[in-house]
Amino acid sequence: MTGLPDMTTVLICALILSLWSLPLNYMPTIARFAVGGVEWGLSNRETMPDIPPWAERAERARKNHFENLPMILVVLLIVQITEQANPIINGAAVGIVALRILHGFAYVLGVPLLRSLAFVGSLLSLFVILWQLFN
């Protein structure tokens, strides 16, 4: 026994995607804190300091992640609840995780073609799971 709960591939993928929210959520805040200092960090933040372009992209990556996370999690939880996981679904779930993380890095680093390919790939992986669920 490893001390870890017995989790399926789709639940592990859901957990990893949820935890990926942490760095995406805090990158822009840390950048603003670096510019605005402690005074800004402890303020009501009614004005936002200007941040470098990478941090602005991180903000957009965060928004994109939180726009897509609910539908991905719902699909993965449906797979779990209905016990329909199979090797194709598991592979597609791992693909979604890898591609969503790649999407975030590509967004922050400013590589639009890679970002777009990762986004499309993650959507295709989601459609593979849906196809497996309903066929």
Image (cartoon, rainbow, N blue to C red):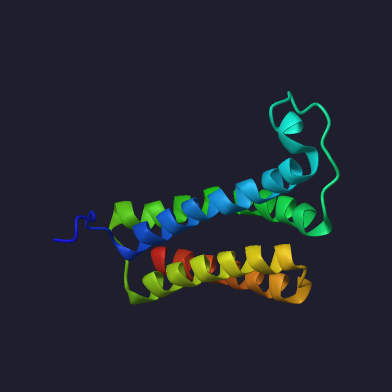
Task: Answer with left or right where residue 119 lies relative to residue 11.
Answer: right
Image point (83%, 31%), residue name: 47
Task: Answer with left or right where residue 115 lies relative to residue 92.
Answer: right
Residue 1 vertical placement versus 59 (above, below) = below
Residue 109 vertical placement versus 60 (above, below) = below
The answer to which image quadrant residue 117 occupies is bottom right
- Can see residue 135? no
Image point (75%, 43%), residue name: 32
User: Which quarter of the figure is the N terminus placed in?
Assistant: bottom left
Name the residue at the front extreme. Answer: 38
Instruction: Name the one closer to the observer, 32 or 133.
Output: 32
Task: Give the x, y percent position of residue 134.
Answer: 42, 63
Task: Give the x, y percent position of residue 52.
Answer: 82, 54
User: Which quarter of the figure is the C terminus placed in?
Assistant: bottom left
Image point (49%, 57%), residue name: 17
Instruction: Name the one closer to the observer, 122 or 36.
Output: 36
Task: Give the x, y percent position of residue 127.
Answer: 53, 67
Task: Give the x, y percent position of residue 108.
Answer: 72, 62
